[in-house]
Image (tube, rainbow, N blue to C red):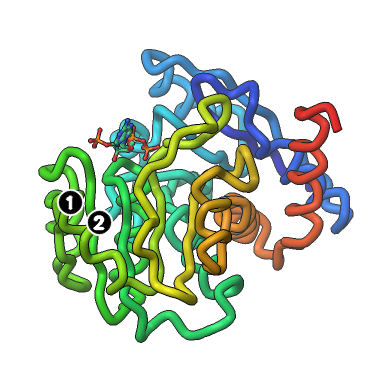
Amino acid sequence: MQLHMGVFGHPVSHSMSPCMHKAAYAHLNIKATYEAFEIAPNDLELAVKSIRTEQLTGVNITLPHKVAVIDYLDEISEEAKAIAAVNTVVHRDGRLVGYNTDGQGFLDSLIQESDESIQNKKVLLVGAGGAARSVAVSLARYGVEELAITNRTLGKAAEIAKICEPFQSINVYPRGLAQAGLTGFDIIINTTSIGMHPDMDRMPFSLETLKRGAVVCDLIYTPLKTRWLQEAEKKGAKTINGLGMFVNQGALAFELWTGQSAPRDIMRKAVVEELMKERGD
Ligand code: ATR
C-alpha cells in the first residue's frame, strides 16, 4: 500500500520537511509520497477536508495554521490540547486526529544532547510565542527543578504559565529580573526568532552573567550556530541548536503515520545536506 503525506503551510516552499521525510521512506523502502501544499488561511478548511477525499495518510501543519486547524479535526491529543496547537494530523479509520510533536521533539533533543539528567535543572525560557508554548508544556509535563519564562510582552509569558499550571508552576520574570538572575539557571532556551537568517546579527538576551557549565539552546537552525550560541560557547557553555528539535518532531510524526521507528540519523543528514545546498556550499 502506498502512503501519502505532506505539509500544509503558508509560505511552505522553503520547508525542509519533504526532503527529510522522503529520505526516511527511501531508507526504509516505504512506498510513500510527501508533498508541500501551499494553503492560504482561507483555504484551510477545504484543505483539511481533502485529507479524507484524497485519502492522505496524514499531514504536518506549519505556520500559520497550527492553531486554526484544530476547528476542523475530529479529535486532538491531550498534549495538543494543552498546547492548543497541532503540527501533525493522522487520518485513522476515517477520523482526523491532531497531535503536537514540537514540544516532545525539543525535549527529546535536550535529553539526548545535554548528556545529563535535566530533572534537577533550573530552566529559563526566553520568548512566549507558539514555539515557547509547546516547549513549556512539554518541559512542565516532564518536570524540572525550576521552570521560568521571560518575554518582552510579560502578559504572554503569564498566559503560558497559566497553561502549564496543571503540570508545573512556572515563574514569570520581567526581562530585567531574568537578566539579573541569569547565574541561577542551568539551561537557557531561546524560543524567539531573533538571530534567524537573514537577521543574524541580533541576539535575544544578554549572556553576560551566564553560569559556567550552563546549557544554552536555540530553537533556530538557520543558521545552525546563531550569534547567540557563538557567544554562549565563548562563555564555556554547552550549546544545542534547533536541528534536533526539527528532526525529532518530524520523526515522531513519521512514527505516528507509519508505525515504524524513524531513522533519525538519516533524516538529520538529509536536512543538513539541504541546508548546505541552500547556502551554496
Ligand atoms: P512563534 O510562534 O514562531 O514562536 P511568535 O508567536 O511570533 O513566533 O513569537 C515570537 C516571540 O519572539 C515572542 O515571544 C516575541 O515577543 P513578544 O511576545 O513581546 O512579541 C519575541 N520577539 C520577536 N521579536 C522580538 C524583539 N525584537 N524583541 C524581543 N522579543 C521579540
Picture residue at 36% right of the left edge, 53% below the top: 134
Mark 2 near mark 1, Cβ–Cβ under 8 Å? yes
Can you say whether 23 is above or below 215 in the image? Answer: above
Residue 148: x and y in percent read: 23, 64
Q: Nearer the viewer, residue 119 or 184?
A: 184
Residue located beneath label 2 in the image: 179
Quadrant containing ligand 1: top left
Residue at 56% in and 18% down: 38
Camera-side residue: 1 or 106? 106
Q: Tag 1: Cα neighbours inside 10 Å, few (<14), some, or many (≥20)?
A: few
Residue 111: x and y, percent? Answer: 53, 74
Q: Could one spot residue 78 in this view of the protein?
A: no
Disc 1, SS: helix
Q: In the picture provided, is 84 more to the left or to the right than 119? A: left
The picture places residue 175, in percent across and down from the top left corner, at 20, 49
Residue 220 showing in the rendered view:
yes
As drawn, 127 above or below 278: below
